[in-house]
Image (cartoon, rainbow, N blue to C red):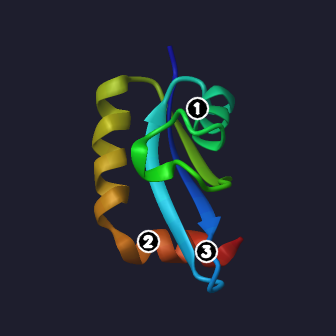
Amino acid sequence: MSYFVYLIVSNLKNNKKISYVGYTNDIKRRLNLHNSGKGAKFTRGKIWKLVYYKKYDSKSIAMKNEYLLKKNYILRKKIINKR
């Protein structure tokens, strides 16, 4: 089974962007959950757009890379600004 690390972005009222990083084995389903208010508590009430994902062959590697991307705000900002 494949796993994905993903980065989603939402725009706030003051034109600032916020981001969320997660991992899943089904990106479409997970994005729909975030946008329907049934995803992570942090993501509820906002409209999210997928801006980055990367595929991994094992869950443990995906989880490690999710952690690294969550903590690396500079890399997240670079990815967001590319889009």
Q: Label 1 sits on what residue type? A: Arg
Q: Label 3 sits on what residue type? A: Leu
Disc 2 from disc 1: Cα separation: 22 Å
Between label 3 and label 1, give the one nearer the viewer.
Answer: 3
Q: Residues within 10 Å of mark 3 (few under 14, many from 20)?
A: few
- Residue indicated by mark 3: 12
Instruction: Out of 15 and 77, give the one closest to the viewer.
Output: 15
Disc 3 from disc 1: Cα separation: 21 Å
Instruction: Out of 40 and 23, give the one closest to the viewer.
Output: 40
Disc 2 from disc 3: Cα separation: 20 Å
Q: Label 2 sits on what residue type? A: Leu
Query: Secondary structure beneath disc 2?
Result: helix
Dividing the picture into quadrants, the one containing residue 68 is bottom left
Dividing the picture into quadrants, the one containing residue 27 is top right
Q: Residue at x 63, y 38 (%)?
A: 31
Q: Position of residue 41 (x, y in %)?
A: 41, 44
Q: Is residue 67 above or below residue 58?
A: below
Q: Residue at x 49, y 30 (%)?
A: 24
Is residue 19 shown left or right of residue 83?
Answer: left
Query: Secondary structure beneath disc 1?
Result: helix
Query: Secondary structure beneath disc 3?
Result: loop
Name the disc covering residue 30, or none.
Answer: 1
Between label 2 and label 1, give the one nearer the viewer.
Answer: 1
Q: Residue at x 61, y 56 (%)?
A: 46
Q: Position of residue 78 (x, y in %)?
A: 53, 76
Between label 2 and label 3, give the one nearer the viewer.
Answer: 3
Q: Position of residue 81 (x, y in %)?
A: 63, 78
